[in-house]
Amino acid sequence: MNPLRASLIRLRALLGKEFLQLLRDPRMRFFMIVPPLFQLMAFGYAASFDVRHAEIAIVDQARTATTRGLLAAVAATGSFTLHYLPDVATASAAIDRGQVRALLRFAPDFETNRTVQIIADGSDSNSAQMITGQLSQALQRSAQTSIGLDPPIQVEDRAWFNDNLDDRPYFVPGIIATIVLITTVILTAMTIVREREFGTLERLLVTPVARLEFLVAKMAAVASVGLFDVLLISVIAVTWFDVPFRGNVIGLLAGSGLFLMSALGIGLLISGYSDTQQQAQLLAFFVIQPMVVLSGFAFPIQNMPEGVQWLTWLNPLRYYLVIIRDVFLKGSPVGAHGFEYAMMAVLGIAALLLSLRQVK
Amino acid sequence: MKLDAAPLILAEDLTRRFGAFTAVDRIQVAVHPGEVFGLLGANGAGKTTAIRMLCGMLPPTIGRIQVAGVDMVRHARRARSQIGYVAQRFSLYGDLTVLENLKLQAGLYGLSGIRRRDRIDAALRLLNLADRQMVMAGTLPLGYRQRLGLAAALLHEPQVLFLDEPTSGVDPMARQRFWELIYTLADRGIGILVTTHYMDEALFCDRLALMQAGRIVAEGDPEALLRRPLPTPILALDSPDAAVFERLAQDWPEVREVIPHAGQLRIRLHAGIDPAALPARIEQAATAHGLTVTGLHPATPELEDVFVAVLEENDG
């Protein structure tokens, strides 16, 4: 028989088997759908750096129409609960007792020098920064749009593409990336190790199946689960969480495909070092956790020590995050991230080659 | 059996070392069309390593393997398409049905379309699995699983069949039927190599090889092996007081081993001992303890006795 035709028949048989096993096993169906949705809900609803209902002390010593207008605008954001206090001493006492997170003060001479003072509780530096930023942005915006004043204070935009400083759009695309990583690494490693545990892998060794045919079928099945998760979460992110989708689907799929090469390679490597499914899971956890931490998913890479920053260059998740956030939030042309695509391709090919060499 | 035909399995100087340890040491194997060749030995004697090399799962350190005329070392994939293999442990997919497993195996050997369907139907009929084809393989009873393993190994009509402890854990009736199938296949001219540790099963083989510490230490057809003179005589003692004799005989200097066997005591003596010394001992013990002896005669050697003798010779 024509060797190519025989190889295709073998591949088709193996692919059919992989999909039957994936779709038939209730645990696998669960693994494909429930944890991704759960993570999406957790990050979509619960995890947030945003300030909501922060208690703010207001000391308005100017008491003019302008200050009342500005305060009305701050209240209208819904992010703050305002407490009007008579003087700075009372307000700073309230900060000390932790009753308010920040103090907003209009001095008596506000109409002449247009300076607003914001004092935040610095013991929680992260939320202090957030509160300061959001307060000043609300003040600046209302000063410009409704009252027509020059900006009374210096304000920096926290995120260009996230006007209302809601960080859900920032997190949800990142979740797609981490879920694809977790699902595909663990699935690859577990299904291969399971075949080894059950002796079915050894059984394949006496058939004319080539190692590459076996791995291609396995990876194709896992990759399609990965892409299914990408599409599932994207649709929910856009329809349910109102995350914008400004780029194109081609960019999303191309980025995901390149990223999957790395993820599958890592899964394959883990399978080579694990004798049991539990070992594979544990090893996957130890690999995935640092990859997520060092990717810029939650912590900005610029804030990391320089040595660690260098390490992140080897992290394919870092590049995938850039691309996936761009696809959702910015919509740059695909060519704008040529470097990220190239790095993922390089890392992906390296991971696959390394794993093919390691795994016998 | 066609002994004049070229052997279907031919291994010459087959050797496998793991570091400093030699698992298989220069063994020669030749299995002809229609022959059932049995490989016997204790755990660790090297039979699993040997069968793994012969199936192409493990490359030999030294030696040549030819299966159905194809060099297993150099053209492993072509040689593999000529062999069927049934593992000791069920190693098909428990989460696929009988039919799905067979379709997968057929596909792995490049079968498709009508030919695939015909071969699967034939295998289902031969192994009497037709009414179970929609059952999940993992829920089948052990005997059925074993038959499914054999069905999967036969789909591509291999010339050679390797069976690694195929009947371990299977009930005696199922074992009997399994061996009838093996004969049916051998009659079709397939060369069959089987490993086992059941002595009664070993007797079903056309030829036997006993492995010890990686070497084949005895080989031949079962009858010829049974005719081998034993350096260690064996006596059979019939007595209603066998249990008491068993305890007493342990302390006699001539006695190597006492084995209760089907109401008798089989007494194995040390090599070179004259069995004539024993009747006096037994009589003495009988009078001293008031025991009855109904018979004492040289025992017919069994395969196990032959193998124990061979293993001892090699140890000494």
Image (tube, coloured by chain):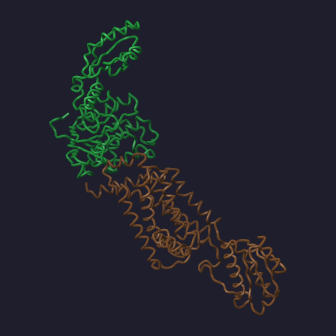
Chain colours: A brown, B green
The quadrant the N terminus of chain A occupies is bottom left
Placement of B150 over or under B234, stated as above or below: below
Most distant residue in the right direction: A86
Looking at this view, is A237 or A114 the one in front?
Answer: A114
Residue B248: x and y in percent read 39, 15
Residue B179: x and y in percent read 32, 31
B250 sits left or right of B27 in the view: right
Most distant residue in the bottom direction: A112
Placement of A275 over or under A150, stated as above or below: above
Image quadrant assignment for residue A173: bottom right
The quadrant the C terminus of chain A occupies is bottom left
Query: Which residue is at 61% across, 77% downward?
Result: A162
A61 sits left or right of A151 in the view: right
Query: Which residue is at 34% across, 22% downward?
Result: B257
Residue B240: x and y in percent read 40, 10
A193 sits left or right of B21 in the view: right
A254 sits left or right of B121 in the view: right
Counting labels gives: 0
Image quadrant assignment for residue B53: top left
